[in-house]
Amino acid sequence: MYDFRDLRPRAEPSPVLPVEAICYAGKWLDREIPEFETLVVEGRAGFERQINAPERVGDGSLYLNSRIKERKITVTFRLLCNTIERYNEVLAKLNQLTNAANVEVKFADEQDYHYIGTIESISLDKPLFSTNGKIEIVCADPYKYSLPKTIEITGTSTSILDPELTYQQTPKLIEFTPTYTISKFEMKTNAGKVLTVNETISSGAKLIIDFNALTIKVNNVSRLMALRLTSNFSDFYIQHGSQITLNDIGKFKMIYEVKRL
């Protein structure tokens, strides 16, 4: 397609992406490399569970526990080059764009969700200018995550009403600024989860609880040691219908991502 700037025609890449085009670490490979085309993606549907069930003396086994295993995604692509020089440039560019580890991975047909993955290998079917290839991606976390969502209130309680939030999960971040000076901060869920920070927080000071980084700060100063040992820090789960209650009034902000298999 063409557009006109200063009455001179300029060729522009088509904005249309293949249905399952891959975006790795913020870069759409189909746009960054004109000779690259995503063909098909496998591994995004379903999941694989590892079951711990030792055999009984009699029939069958005894179920103890289970875990969902890491996710493996395979991207099949086409590479169309005309010269050896361009072929080498394309491979160098592909390697450069896919070098980062543990980054966001998303696809054109579901851009509101992303995985966190690392490319394990890139291979070509044949060492030819025109060939197909495969990108193998390992997602240690098998879930995919939505764009961040935010809940903000001024008060002492709120309900999470999000039908997409079907899996139990922790928030990404909690911010709380008390209206008055408080001797401690405590929040509870209607499912019995409790998180307590035994720290005096002045009126207007900001408490930040980062569940991903496992940090607690008041006005950017670490206060992790003030966390009560019995608190549900790693498992302060929320989901659709959860009610959050605070021990005092203030400005409360919660940031979370919806996760799905």
Image (cartoon, helix red, strand yellow):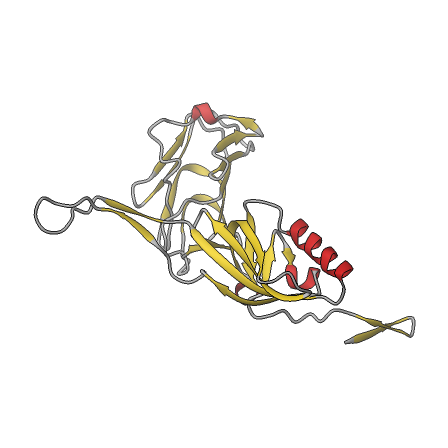
Q: What residue appears at the point 91 percent right and 74 percent down from the top-left corner?
A: 7
Total tally of numbered discs in the picture: 0
Image-quadrant location for residue 229 = top left
Image-quadrant location for residue 17 = bottom right
Q: What residue appears at the point 32 percent right and 52 percent down from the top-left corner?
A: 49
Q: Describe residue 64's horizontal placement relative to residue 255 as left or right.
A: left
Image-quadrant location for residue 225 = top left
Q: Quarter holding the N terminus? A: bottom right
Q: Describe residue 31's horizontal placement relative to residue 114 as left or right.
A: right
**Where residue 149 sits: x, y (%)?**
51, 53
Q: Quarter holding the C terminus? A: bottom left
Q: What residue appears at the point 39 percent right and 35 percent down from the top-left corner?
A: 233
Q: Is residue 19 above or below residue 56?
A: below
**Where residue 166 sits: x, y (%)?**
37, 56
Q: Is residue 217 above or below residue 157?
A: above
The residue furthest front is 127
- Nearer-the-camera pick, 104 or 38: 38
- The answer to whether residue 124 is seen in the rendering is yes
- The answer to whether residue 143 is seen in the rendering is no
